[in-house]
Image (cartoon, rainbow, N blue to C red):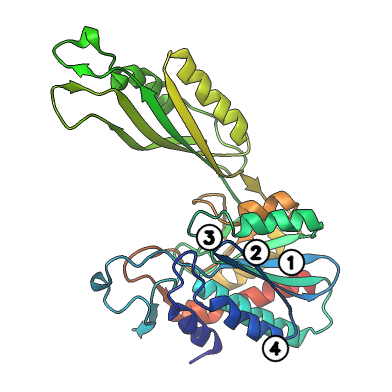
Amino acid sequence: MSDVLDLTCDLIARPSVTPDDAGCQPMIAERLRNAGFDIESLRYGDVDNLWATHGSDGPVLVLLGHTDVVPPGPVEAWTSDPFVPTVRDGVLYGRGAADMKSGVAAFVVAAERFVVAHPDHTGTLALLLTSDEEGDAIDGVRRVADTFRARGQRIDWCITGEPSSTERLGDLLRVGRRGSLTGTLTVRGVQGHVAYPHKARNPIHLFAPALSELTARRWDDGFDSFPPTSLQVSDLHAGTGASNVIPGVLRAVFNLRYNPHWDARRLETEVAQVLDRHGLDYDLHWHRSGEPFHTPEGKLRAAAREVLTGFSGAAPEESTGGGTSDARFIAPLGAQCIEIGPVNASIHQVDEHVRVADLEALPDLYQRLIERLLA
């Protein structure tokens, strides 16, 4: 068994469902300490965060990942136990195999190999891990970023190991992410009998024109490599369960995925103006997951493009698609951020998996990229 496969299996065997790290970070910390890294554990609430550094001064390159996983769901739905790593026909199965214990293991192995080959490298190589990426992401990298901001911690480049490839390892380079903003809306009406609508105010009818306006709106035409901003309703609920009752309250949840044309505050204002224009009696609460970020052309993107082209045999697609990642908390510190990882085909699914051949190639990919930047 290869070093990276062995470490990935050790990590999968630890049921580190958010925010429980289940001992993953102490095991990694011990390995990196033995390789000459300085180790700092940053625990906030129930969340573990690991900051490991080798070298000094700048530039500072951070390898960013998470040790937590989503719950496996019904264990009986899996072909094998989700926390018993199993290789079948050249594929490793287990919760976190792709998202993202394979990336974390590859980061560790690449970092170990790099400092052996380049003990006096320029700048600082760092590894930042959290146990709160899949959860609320309050006491994870978001909180660490606040600590770094207060310290004046410099970060020049950040590589996130999230599963980003589409068909083959290295065929996609993520160079940014959209912002994410969630609204939870309560619209108040007056409950009544459906036979006497003049004595009631139906919040469904009241909200429908505003909903139509919000969902039909073209917010923008995109930005650079970003798609247009999108508003999607994820939950809409009203009613008492009786067919002859006009409900008194409607509740809706919606999400905006937005490009750098916008920031959260401006979008919040725009939505509120629509609701006000329709005369609604409402409460609206917002959750800001993170602002959009974009890494322009420069040394980081050029190095990543060169390395990925060598691995996949063609220049990678350079994308800002997908959901969010913890890089959204690192980018505001002034860092350029990219994401490179294994194939995203089974994350959060039953029988999550990664190809063993891809896993064994991943440390070399990361090491080559580190060498382009710090050797």
Q: Give the farthest residue toward the bottom.
A: 1
Query: To which residue does mark 2 refer?
Result: 159
Task: Tell me where residue 373 appears, x and y as whole percent.
Answer: 76, 69
Looking at the picture, does residue 54 appear above or below residue 191? below
Q: Position of residue 55 (x, y in %)?
A: 81, 76
Q: Does 234 sit left or right of 145 as displayed? A: left
Residues at marks 3 and 4, CA–CA distance in whole angstroms: 27 Å
Camera-side residue of 350 and 319 = 350
In this rendering, the label closer to the viewer, 3 or 2: 3
Helix, strand or loop under label 1:
strand
- Mark 3 or mark 1, which has the lower sequence index? 1
N-terminal of the two: label 4 or label 1? 4
Q: Secondary structure at mark 3?
A: loop
Read off the residue under disc 3: 133
In terms of depth relative to the viewer, which is nearer, 360 or 97? 97
- Is residue 158 shown left or right of residue 217? right
Vertical comparison of 43 with 296: above or below: below
Q: Which mark is residue 152?
A: none
Provide the residue designation for mark 1: 61
Disc 4 designates what residue?
A: 34
Q: Is residue 210 above or below residue 360?
A: above
Q: Is residue 96 above or below residue 86?
A: above
Specify the amino acid type for callout 4. Asn
